Image (tube, helix red, strand yellow):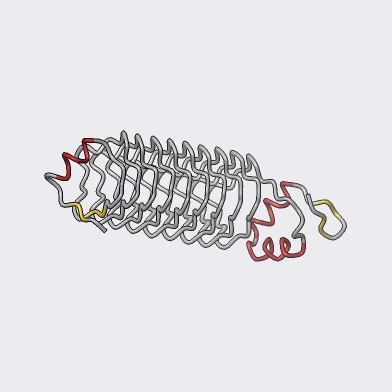
Amino acid sequence: MAEKGGKEMQKDELVAMLKRSVQEFNSWRKENLNERIDLSEVDLSGANLQGADLSYAKLLRTNLRGANLGGAHLRGANFSEANLRGTNLSEANLHEANLCRVNLHYADLRWVDLGGADLREANLSNVDLRGANLYETNLCDANLCDADLCNADLRLAKLYKANLSQANLRGANLRGANLSKANLRYADMSEANLCEADLQGADLCGANLEKAKMDSATWDKVVERLRATVRIEAE
């Protein structure tokens, strides 16, 4: 931990400062740029951390349930196995963050930057990801059941074996995404861009592909049958 006024900063002191004033904490970080922030297994549930600079921090198994991290700087942070249920992360920067096996059930992730982030096996059910940046994000084996991904950028995203049943992917950009063996049952992919996407082995039972663009996409025979009944547009 870093020193403040000649005294080594302990984890509990950092937590107290963060809860007391985000502005104070951010100012301290600017003066201690080389210090590693470790807030693993800390209880920050319900805390107002809007705009906090926790970039590259360790937050393993941290309890952030119901916290406000709107607009926070979280680039490269390690949230592995953290509890983020119902957390507000709208417009936060989570670029290249580690979110493996995190619980994000009912979280607000509108317009969040998750480009290049690792969300393998994460629980994202009922999450609001409208307009989110998920470019090259790893979502393999993630649970996105009932998630709202309307107009999200999922180009080159890895969604192998992801559960996207009943998800809203209307207008989403999935160009080049890997959706092989994904569960897309009853998902709304109308007007989505699926050009060059890999849909091999995906379950598309009941999916809405009306006006979806699928030029050069790879699919099984099931999609060929869907083309006969659903309007799918070439790019």
Q: Position of residue 54 (x, y in %)?
A: 63, 55
Q: Is residue 114 left or right of residue 21?
A: left
Q: How many marks?
A: 0
Q: Nearer the viewer, residue 115 or 58?
A: 115
Q: Dividing the picture into quarters, in which one does residue 20 lie?
A: bottom right
> In the image as oriented, which residue stretches furthest toward the right?
6
Q: Is residue 138 left or right of residue 149?
A: right
> In the image as oriented, which residue stretches furthest toward the left?
229
Task: Using the image, determine if residue 49 lies above or below residue 157.
Answer: below
Please report the residue visible at 85 percent of the width from the left and 54 percent of the height from the top. Answer: 7
Q: Is residue 211 left or right of residue 34?
A: left
Please report the residue visible at 43 percent of the width from the left and 50 percent of the height from the top. Answer: 156
Q: Position of residue 224 (x, y in %)?
A: 19, 40
Q: Nearer the viewer, residue 203 or 15?
A: 203
Q: Position of residue 115 (x, y in %)?
A: 50, 54
Q: Is residue 6 left or right of residue 77?
A: right
Q: Nearer the viewer, residue 63 or 156?
A: 156
Image quadrant containing the C terminus? bottom left
Q: Position of residue 13 (x, y in %)?
A: 73, 51
